[in-house]
């Protein structure tokens, strides 16, 4: 796993609209209505975006969010905040969360 700051680095999140605008750039526009995607934004203490990570792409009904990967990137980037996001191309907003330890 490697980390490189991208084009969105240095943007500051002050509200949900800021987060939406940045995340909208990160989701693949060709797949957003076809395939579930999971994206993570990493922030410093001032809510400045220090990086992002396309965690996974799944199918129409699901994708994997591996907590170990999310946190390992957070540690590598020295992030103090996270914003987790994923889409629902199926339109079904009923979630089933499974935690496997």
Image (spheres, rainbow, N blue to C red):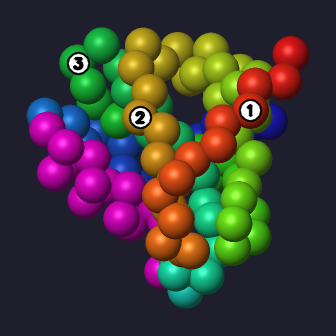
Q: Mark 3 points at which residue?
A: 46
- The correct choice, above or below, for 94 with respect to 4 in the image is below
Residue 26 percent coordinates (x, y): 46, 62
Q: Where is residue 77 in the image (x, y as percent from the top left)?
A: 56, 23
Mark 2 residue element: strand
Q: Which residue lies furthest to the front in this view?
A: 94
Give the spatial CA distance, label 1 vs label 2: 19 Å
Which quadrant, please, contains the N terminus? Answer: top right
Q: Can residue 8 be seen in this view?
A: yes
Q: Disc 3 and disc 2: Cα gap in Å?
A: 14 Å
Q: Which residue is drawn at 65% across and 29% down?
A: 70
* Residue 28 to residue 56: above or below: below
Q: Is residue 75 above or below residue 91?
A: above
Is 52 covered by the magenta stretch? no
**Disc 1 packing (10 Å; few <14; some 14–19; many ≥20):** few
Residue at 74% across, 32% down: 98
**Which secondary structure is most common in the magenta stretch?**
helix
Earlier in the chain: of badge 3 and badge 2, it is: 3
Which residue corresponds to the image point at 47% horizontal and 58% vertical from the top-left?
Answer: 93
Q: Give the range drawn in magenta.
A: 15-29
Residue 83 is labelled as 2
**Around disc 3, counting alpha carbons within 10 Å, would you say few (fewer than 14), some (14 to 19), or many (20 or more)?**
few
Point 38% across, 66% down: residue: 25
Choose the circle earlier in sequence order: 3 or 1: 3
């Amino acid at each position: 796993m490697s980390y490189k700051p991208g084009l969105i680095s240095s943007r500051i999140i002050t509200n949900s609209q800021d987060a939406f605008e940045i995340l909208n750039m990160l989701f693949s526009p060709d797949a957003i209505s076809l395939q579930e995607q999971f994206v993570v934004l990493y922030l410093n203490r001032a809510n400045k975006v220090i990086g992002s990570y396309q965690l996974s792409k799944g199918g129409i009904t699901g994708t994997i969010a591996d907590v170990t990967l999310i946190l390992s990137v957070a540690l590598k980037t020295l992030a103090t905040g996270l914003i987790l996001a994923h889409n629902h191309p199926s339109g079904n907003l009923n979630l089933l969360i499974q935690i496997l330890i």
